[in-house]
Image: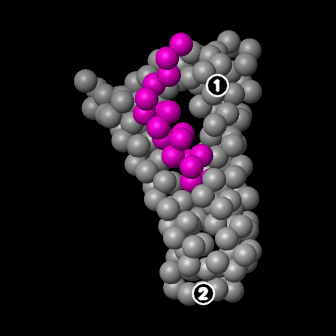
Amino acid sequence: MTVPILPTISTSCIVISAVLVAIGWWQIKQKKTEAHQKTMFAAAIFALLFFLIYLSRTIFIGNTAFGGPDDVKIYYTVFLIFHIVLATTGAVFGLVTLFSAYKKEWTRHRKLGPITSIVWFFTATTGVVVYLLLYVIYQGGETTSVIKAILGF
């Protein structure tokens, strides 16, 4: 079985991002502020790479439909919606947490950081499950380009 390269790379990026967030969390608990800043910056870069690959793939190639059995599709769809809401929430929390650090709003940053990290861990975990369901456990369904869908060619 082969898996598509772009979803594999983007999913790897989000997993690396979550691992770096965990390392950064440990670093700040150890009072290693400078290492924490560098690690969290790297985590943000990997999250951004995920987003850019995902967005580019969605625009130019399209999204892959669930290719598994019909009786599993409803559960997959509910899980996917949960993942999308979680990912959106995690992204917003992540940006606010990063900007609060950038602006040296340490009280806000310390309050949001642990919440953001936990949401990010769940986002990465559910993202891996979506990837496994779409490309590993079941063969992906049809993929349609968003540009083709919008422009009609």
| Mark 2 surroundings within 10 Å by alpha-carbon count, few (fewer than 14), some (14 through 19), many (20 or more) | few
The amino acid marked with disc number 1 is Leu
The amino acid marked with disc number 2 is Glu
Residue 90 visible at all: no
Span shown in magenta: 1-18
Q: Nearer the viewer, residue 22 or 11?
A: 22
Q: Distance between the residues labelled 1 and 2?
A: 40 Å
Q: Colour scheme in the image?
A: one colour
Give the side of residue 103 with respect to residue 125, left or right.
Answer: left
Q: Residue 105 carries which label?
A: 2
Label 1 or label 2, whichever comes before in sequence order: 2
**Residue behind mark 1:** 133
Q: Is residue 55 magenta?
A: no
The reply to whether discs 1 and 2 touch (Cβ–Cβ < 8 Å) is no
Instruction: Give SS at disc 2.
Output: loop
The residue shown at (45%, 25%) is 4
Would you place residue 32 above or below residue 72 in this image?
A: below
The residue shown at (62%, 53%) is 18
Image coordinates of residue 66 in percent, x first then y, are 59, 22
Would you place residue 146 above or below residue 65 in this image?
A: below
